[in-house]
Amino acid sequence: MPDADVDDRAEARAASGGVWEKLYEAFGRPRGPSRPEAWRSPLRGPWLTSLFGSVLLVGIPVMFITGLVSYAAYDPRLPGNDTTPTHGILGFYLFDWLTSPSWIYRVSQGIHVILGFALTPIVLAKLWSVMPKFFAWPPVRSIAMLLERLSLALLVGGVIFQFFTGIFDVEYFYFWNFSFYDAHFYGAWAFMAGFVIHVGLKFPTMRRSLRTRRLRDELRCPLSDTRPEPSDESGLVAVAPAAPTLSRRGLLGLVGATSLATIVFTAGENIGGWTRAIALLAPRGRSYGSGPTDFQINKTAAVVGVTQQKIDQWTLEIVGAKKLVLTRAQLMSLPQSTQRLPIACVEGWATEQTWTGIPLAHLASMAGIDKPRGVQVNSLQPPGGFGATYLSAEQILDPRSLLALKVNGVDLSIDHGFPARNIIPAAPGVHNTKWVNKLTFHD
Ligand SMILES: Nc1nc2c(c(=O)[nH]1)N[C@H]1C(S)=C(S)[C@@H](COP(=O)(O)O)O[C@H]1N2
Ligand SMILES: [Mo]
């Protein structure tokens, strides 16, 4: 039966007026993995590919939107915050990042990172399902196909690049020498260009293919009844299928279970509580303090070169219409406010704590600026590793935005930013500067 299929195909080629023979004369005969006969899995077919595709059709736009939200949350329009100054119209949608609800970045970025993990097995399964196409020979047969192939280069290159850089960033493997943030941003747009073209070209095929089988039936179909999808023009169905060693439901179960496992082993970094303990795939924020300061630490003081000596000599400089220099004791004697706010890192982890300190708006008015337009925040950390960040008027004026001196009723620990750190509702973790030593308010 498989051989008959090969013959059918040869006949079809002969019937098509020898077009294939002419192409082979021009390009050479297909060899190795370019021979259609080389791909033998009986599970490959348009239905299977379309099923994975339909999951990604929903998942990838969610990744894109939450990614853009994160880009906006970094407030790249504020001076000094933008590491992608050539973004041009790609920043058309930017808006001043919100301060309410305070959990918005935690949820949005948690979805981005955890969904990214969960979609990875599906991306891999889909790439596997279309693998013969990558080796199709001759590679290009018409102008239309050339354009399709170019869009596929963006799509496949893009999906690999985005998932690879995203996962490796979260997992602390920085073996590249470009900025993750910039590359992931521009990569997202290139990927989405390929994605939109691909969906435009393939959506009708996907819908048609999904109607050829019912998922429910496949989930009931054992290995012994597993047959290839009917052969067609898609180039996905094996012309000489091997006997199945795995049922379709077995494959779907494997992919689905792997996807679910990534959720179980990452979601705890964002949700917290007892689930934190099983977030084995999430190394971020695994260092902790002790007692009331027992929560995630991204970078310890030692790692970034904040020494005890620098802390001992610390004072806070506040610059505005006038300049003030304050000691920690002076700060402690100012009116304090206590707020329960999360730190939510771009890498997906989050932790909510109770912070006590001075509202930034109060510090602005002490510096003689009642209507601040923004504030530049500097820290004890030697420049290079962690630049100044800039906060918006809305962030300063939100009464919950604090220069925190205490957390959970005790002084900040050094690793959590002692003597003073910013804590801003709904801001990405990176804007919660630790070891703050200078605030420059602008009006
Ligand atoms: N000075 C300084 N502040 C910083 C950082 C840093 O590296 N240096 N990391 C930021 C990032 S990326 C995050 S997610 C939070 C983490 O806060 P934590 O270490 O107290 O959990 O601090 C932010 N503040
Ligand atoms: Mo972060």
Image (tube, rainbow, N blue to C red):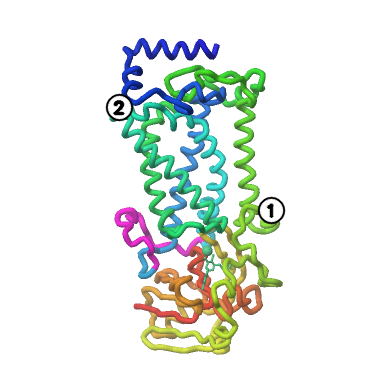
Query: From this viewpoint, is residue 109 visible?
Result: yes
Q: Is 134 part of what is drawn in magenta?
A: no
User: Which stretch is magenta?
Assistant: 81-101
In the image: residue 12, left or right of residue 291: left
Q: Main secondary structure of the magenta part?
A: loop
Specify whether tag 2 is near ligand 2 (CB below 8 Å).
no
Q: Secondary structure at mark 2?
A: loop
Q: Residue at x 41, y 88 (%)?
A: 323
Query: Where, quadrant-wise, is the C terminus in this rendering?
Result: bottom left
Query: From this viewpoint, is residue 207 visible?
Result: no
Query: Where, quadrant-wise, is the N terminus in this rendering?
Result: top right
Q: Is residue 195 above or below residue 187?
A: above
Q: Which residue is mark 2?
A: 142
Q: State the mark number for residue 278.
A: 1
Disc 1 crowd rating (10 Å Cα; few below 14, some 14-19, many 20+) is some
Residue 43, quarter of picture:
top right
Q: Where residue 180 sits: x, y (%)?
A: 45, 58
The mark lying in front, picked from 1 and 2, is 2
* Amino acid type of the residue tagged 1 in the rendering: Ile
* Amino acid type of the residue tagged 2 in the rendering: Ser
Q: Where residue 114 sits: x, y (%)?
A: 56, 50
Q: Residue furthest left?
A: 143
